[in-house]
Image (tube, helix red, strand yellow):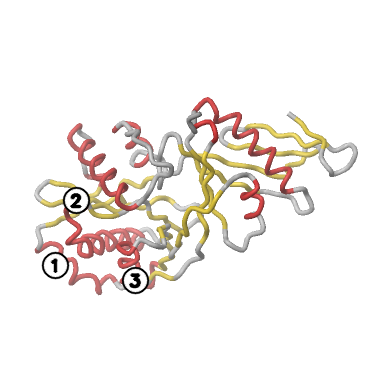
Amino acid sequence: MGLAAPFGDQDTLEVRLEGQKVIAEIAGKQVGSLRFFHNRFHYHPRIYSVSFADFVSGSDTTLIARKLYDCLVKELQPHNPLLLRTGIDEDDPFYTVLRALGFRDYRRVYNPVLEVTAVNLESLKTNATTFAALGYEIVRLSDLDWTTEVAAKLYALHTDVYSDTSTVVPATPERFSQAEWLAATVKDDAVIPEAFFIAVQDGEFVGFGNLFRGEIEGELETGTFGTRRSYRHHHREIMLALKAQEIAYAKRHNHKMIRAEIDAENPLILQICAELPFMQGKDYISMVKVMNWTVAP
């Protein structure tokens, strides 16, 4: 598709789909892009994360963003999406463009960063002793035989923790199949099985923490982490034990940083970050766009 744009009489803005990316070009030169994907932190088969990028200085960002968005809507409509999610720094001028496209503020997200070499694991040994004395142990995903029982227990753990730590907007009664959820959150190529740690008591999976390969060389990213509600009375002991394992893994493999993405209003997660030498990252605004065709007439 094409549209005459105010870049010169002969210039035409074209957009095309390339995999999970929409690319905008003028006279064969890329002037903007829009990537769309399922977010592994907030997986839902009908919710997509989107990321605008690559705008060329001096171009009509508003017009380009609109054409990228329109192409995306056409592509996703057969999948009947519930909403789109994106994030932006609060002082970014592109915020007004997102608002014009119908995105609205949802929540503030905190991005703490942990410098691996700054952590003294000896300081966590007392907690490890307490953790063991309470009857808990930690296993790695890579050590488990992938049986039907293990898959079911991990699915139940993951969905239980996620439902307490994240919110899907708008609310939906749709339940994801076990196979679909695990494919997106456990079997994804970015998951590191040796860095996916599960807290166990008497054979029950009670908490977990995992690391993903980061987008920046030498860095790791945390995925969803937490404890089941029925074990929340030992949340601190369980989570510090899991975090110690993650940090030890990062040290062994010479990773410099661990980045997290958490809800700035989540006191349980903030408590754990406060007990480790996390540095304050840059907050950003999470924005959502509810798709019109999901609204009942």
Q: In this view, does 100 lie above or below 267?
A: above
Instruction: Name the residue: 23% across, 36% down.
Output: 151
Mark 2 crowdedness (10 Å alpha carbons): few <14, some 14-19, many ≥20: many
Q: What residue type is labelled 3?
A: Ala
Q: Is residue 78 left or right of residue 129?
A: right
Marks 1 and 3, how far apart at CA:
19 Å
Q: In this view, does 205 lie above or below 107?
A: above
Q: Which amino acid does label 1 sit on?
A: Thr
Does dot 2 land on a helix, a strand or a loop?
A: strand
From the top left corner, tell me how far across and down residue 122 is, in percent.
24, 73
Q: In this view, does 280 lie to the left or right of 56?
A: left
Residue pointed to by mark 1: 130
- Which image quadrant for residue 270? bottom left
Residue pointed to by mark 2: 206
Q: In the image shown, does 39 or 99 lie closer to the viewer?
A: 99
From the top left corner, tell me how far across and down residue 282 is, in percent.
51, 65
- Foreground mark, 1 or 3, reads 3
Q: Is residue 125 left or right of residue 216?
A: left
Q: In the image shown, does 61 or 145 lie closer to the viewer?
A: 61
Marks 3 and 2, how far apart at CA:
22 Å
Farthest top residue?
A: 78
Q: Is residue 114 left or right of residue 80?
A: left
Marks 2 and 1, how far apart at CA:
16 Å
Residue pointed to by mark 3: 274
Q: Is residue 186 above or below residue 243?
A: above
